[in-house]
Image (cartoon, rainbow, N blue to C red):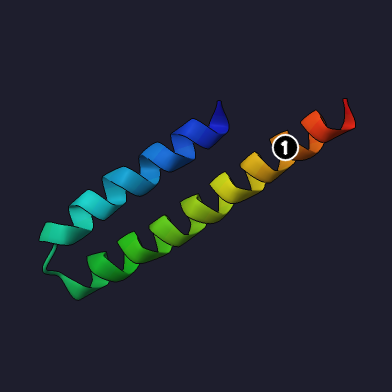
Amino acid sequence: MRVFFDIYQVNIAATKLKTETDPDIQKYLKGNIAISYLEAEIGIGSILALLALT
């Protein structure tokens, strides 16, 4: 379930990034996208590893 939330967060931040003009907020959104994407990748990898073990 956490993976879906991370993907949702990436989508929200990417949408906001398209219209944001403040460089500080753009930097924050880019960091948020990177972290949420990384968390989603880790989550998907964990799920696949657990499925491989069963």
Residue drawn at (48%, 32%), measured in percent from left and top?
4
| Secondary structure of residue under mark 1 | helix
Quadrant for the N terminus in the image: top right
Say above or below: 48 vs 17: above
Report the side of 18 relative to 10 (left or right): left
Which one is in front, 49 or 35?
49
Report the side of 14 relative to 3 (left or right): left
Say above or below: 13 vs 46: below
Residue drawn at (16%, 59%), measured in percent from left and top?
18
The image quadrant of residue 54 is top right
Residue drawn at (55%, 45%), measured in percent from left and top?
40
List x then y, in percent, for residue 38.
Answer: 56, 55
Say above or below: 13 vs 2: below
Pick out the residue farthest to the right.
53
Residue drawn at (59%, 49%), measured in percent from left and top?
41
Q: How many marks?
A: 1
Say above or below: 53 vs 15: above
List x then y, in percent, for residue 10.
Answer: 37, 48
Which one is in front, 50 or 22?
50
List x then y, in percent, for residue 5.
Answer: 46, 33
Q: Name the residue carrying label 1.
A: 48
Mark 1: few/some/many CA within 10 Å (<14, 14-19, 20+): few
List x then y, in percent, for residue 51.
Answer: 78, 29
The image quadrant of residue 49 is top right
| Amino acid under disc 1 | Leu
Report the side of 53 relative to 8 (left or right): right
Pick out the residue farthest to the bottom.
23
